[in-house]
Amino acid sequence: MAQSIGLTKRLLYRCYHMALRLALFVYPIPRPKCFKSAQIDIWLAELKQQNIERLLVVTDQTLLSLGIAAPVITALESAGISTSIYSDILPDPDINEIESGFMLYTQDKCQGIVAIGGGSVIDGAKLIGVRAAKPHKKLMQLRGLFKVMRRLPPLTAVPTTAGTGSETTVAAVVSNRKQQDKFAIADYCLAPKYALLMPELSQGLPPFITATTAMDALTHALEAFIGINGTQFTNQKALSACKLIFDNFPLVIQEPSNIKVRENLLNASFYAGEAFTRTSVGYVHAIAHQLGAKYHVAHGLANAILLDVVLTEYGETIHDKLALIADYCELGDNKIDDRSQKAALVIEKIRELKELANLPTKVDELDATDIPDITTAAMKEAHPDYPVPEFWSSNRFDHVLQQVLT
C-alpha cells in the first residue's frame, strides 16, 4: 500500500518551509571570503593580521602523497605560519578520525584550520573545529541543528574537487562506523571563514571523479532552483552554476588540463553551494543519501544516476522552472516557445553529459527487495525538511528506483 502525505501535513510542511525562508532574511547565512590563486598573498596577509602562528592542515593521504596539498603548505610556511599535518581523513569521515585530528590540534596549540581536499576532508576539518570550539561536548551530542552556537577557529577551505560546495555550507556529515550510523551537524558557525579556489589543484583528477563531482554541483544548482524556497540571490547563483557546468563539462572531458575550464567548474560548484545552502535540496538527494548509506555508492555518482530520472518524475510541476534554465543556458533553438519542450532540453542535456563521460544510468548494487526500505528512509529524510516542488507518495519513489534498477 502506498504511503502518502495527508493535506494537514502538507500544509504544516509548507508553513515550516515558509518559516525557514523568513529566517534567512532575519539571520542571513554567513558567506566565506573568497580568494583565487592569484590572491593567495592577500589570504596569507589576512591570517598574519590575526597573529596566527600555527595552523592544522587537514587533508587525506592521497592528496598528500601526490603533492597536491604541497603548494598551500609551502605558501603558509614561506609566510612564517607553521603547519601541523593531519592526513587521516577517509571518505565519509568517522568520529574517531575527527577525535584524532582534534587531539593533534590541541597538542600542537594550533590557532586555525586549513582543509585541502574534497567534501569529506572539508567536513572533517569543520568537525575538528567544532570539537575545538566545544571541547567538552562529543559530536554525538551536537548532531542536528544549532547545537554548536560558538565561533569556530578560523577555517579556510581549499576544495580540490568541483562538486560538493562544502566550502560554502553550514553543515558537516560524520559517520559512527561502530554503530553503523551517519549524522549531520549544522550551524551557521560551520561556514568556513575563507574559501581559496585554486583550479590547478584539480588538474590531475581522474575523468570519472571530475564528471561525478560536476554532476553533484549540477544537482545542487537544479534542486536549489526548482524548490519553492528560492530567492533572487539563490536563483541567480543556481542559474550561473547551471550555465557554467553545461558549457564546461564537455570541455573538461576533452581538455582535462585546461586551467580555465577547471576554474569555471570550481566557480560553478561554489555558486551552487551558495544556492543550496540557503534553499536546501530535494528528492534526488533524499534517495542518493540512502544509496550511499546502504551500498556505499559515491554521492556524486548517485546524484548523476538519479538526476534526470527524478526531474522527469516531477513532470509538469517543474516545467516552468526548467524552461527558465533552458533559456538562461541557451539550450536548443531559440524559436522554441513551448515550456515542456524547453524542459525536455534540460533533461536531454543532462543525459548527453552523462553519456559523454560514460557515467552509468543504473545502480548495480540496488536490490529490488530493498526498494521499500529505501523509499521509507528517503521520505523520512525529505519530509518536512526539503522544500520540494511537490510532495510524492511512496509509489513515486518506488517508480524512480525501479528505473535505476539493473
Image: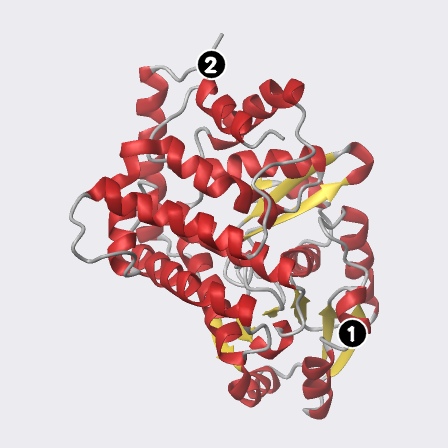
Residue 193 visible (yes or no): no
x 60%, y 44%: residue = 360
x 71%, y 48%: residue = 92
Inspect the image, locate mark 1, and give the three-letter code of the amino acid beneath it. Leu
Residue linked to disc 2: 3
Residue linked to disc 1: 66
x 30%, y 55%: residue = 235
Measure the alpha-carbon separation of dots 1 and 2: 49 Å
x 74%, y 71%: residue = 56
Q: Quadrant of the C terminus?
A: top right
Q: Taking 193 as reference, is 396 above or below it?
A: above
The label nearer to you, 1 versus 2, is 1
* Image position of 73 (left or right of 163): right
Inspect the image, locate mark 2, and give the three-letter code of the amino acid beneath it. Gln
Q: Are marks 1 and 2 in contact (CB under 8 Å)?
A: no
The location of residue 256, given as percent across then percent down, is: 59, 72
Crowding around mark 2 (Cα neighbors within 10 Å: few <14, some 14 to 19, many 20+) is: few
Report the label total: 2
The location of residue 226, given as percent across then percent down, is: 33, 44
